[in-house]
Structure formats: structure tokens, C-alpha cells
Image: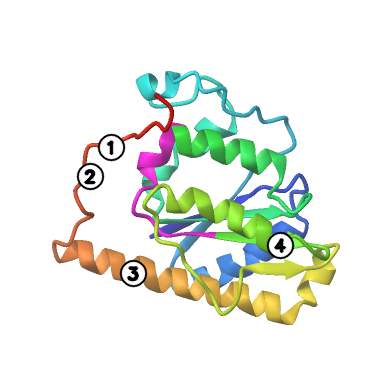
Amino acid sequence: MKVILVNGSPHEKGSTYTSLCETAKALNDSGIETEIFWLGIDPLAGCIGCGSCGKTGKCFRNDKVNELSEKLDGADGFVFGSPVHYASASGALTAFMDRLFMSAGSKMRGKPAAAVVSCRRGGASAAFDQINKYFTINAMPIVSSQYWNQVHGNNADEVCQDEEGMQTLRILGKNMAWLIKCIKLGKDNGITMPELEAKIKTNYIR
């Protein structure tokens, strides 16, 4: 069993990474393998709505989106982490998630997910909310903790001093491990995802 944790910060080993590591350690301690996937610092384009991924199964831009897409089948859960930029997830993570969920959302359907955000002071709940919306539109169970999954600090050292925040992230890891194991047990006993209905799209202007 494996969880992929996506680091949406331009800083490879800053506050967001420190946060994800705390959750990853709790997952490891519960017997779950983890991988931290960093988006890097190269520009990530947003989705242009061309629809080519619907025909080919991948985005026409051969970048980090397709790189992660190839790993999705081997993962049982996901954590998407981001610094808070103007009360939102980072621009890189937003563009990344737009394209990943458009091109490969079916590979994540039914798998537990969680958002983790790191901020200096404010805007955490808005960014947290934004990331969670991707999961609710894709039939992904959202894993919770004892509080919203956020830490405060201007750098990695300060984040480590946020004792409540770090505890929240540890409990998140334990809760995700528990849910992943419950889902596996269900599958082993013949319980499967509900069958998909043909999607109905209602346009408001005709």
C-alpha cells in the first residue's frame, strides 16, 4: 500500500515539505509506503481545455503532470500540499491539479485524499478549501484529522515549532493509513466501488 504526497511549493525542502514529511512518517509507522513528489520550479502551464487528453489518456504537454499520472495506478491514496499564496494554493499546484484531474482523474477515483497547507499567518482555510474541491468532484474520500490540516511558520524551523499543527498532520497520516486498510479489507471481501452512471450535464443557458 502506498501514498503519494505532492509538494506544490517552489521550495523543495521548505515548510510544505516539512509538513508532508510529518504525515509521511505517520503513514510509514502504520505500514504504508510513501513517496514525496515535488513539482519543481519549472513553469507549469494551465489547462487550455483542448480535450486531447480525453482521446489519448494523457496531457499533450509532457511534463510533471504526465510524470505523476504514470504513478497513479500504483498509489492507494494522495496528499496534496501547498504553501498559501494570496489565500490560495500555489499557482503551480493549481495548474497542476487542473490538468491532472482533467487528464487522469479516473485513476484516482475512490482513493482517499487530503490537503495540507502551510502559511505564515492567514489564508490557510481558503487554500485548504480550494484543494479539497478537487477531491469532492472526483469521488475521492477526504481524510480528516483533529483540525484543519494546516501549519504556521515562515520557514521549516518555525513550522516544527507549531506543535498543534504537527500533531494534526501526524493524526492525518494515521487516519489515512486506517482508511486505506479498511478499503483494502473491503475489496478483499468483494466490496467494490458503486457502478458509474452515465454522466448527465445540464447547461443553464440554451
Label 3 vs label 1: CA separation? 30 Å
Secondary element at image label 4: helix
Name the residue carrying label 1: 199
Residue reaching furthest front?
206
Cβ atoms under marks 2 and 1 closer than 8 Å: yes
Residue 41, horizontal then vertical, whole percent: 75, 37
Q: Is 187 colored magenta in this rendering?
A: no
Secondary element at image label 1: loop
Whether residue 189 is visible here, answered yes or no, is yes
Residue 19, horizontal then vertical, whole percent: 68, 65
Nearer the observer, 71 or 171? 171
- The residue drawn where x is 28% and y is 64% is 184
What segment is highlighted magenta in the picture?
103-114
Amino acid found under the numbered disc labelled 1 = Lys
Name the residue carrying label 3: 181
Name the residue carrying label 2: 196
Q: Looking at the image, is mark 2 or mark 3 nearer the viewer? A: 2
Q: Residues within 10 Å of mark 1 (few under 14, many from 20)?
A: few
Earlier-in-chain disc, 2 versus 4: 4
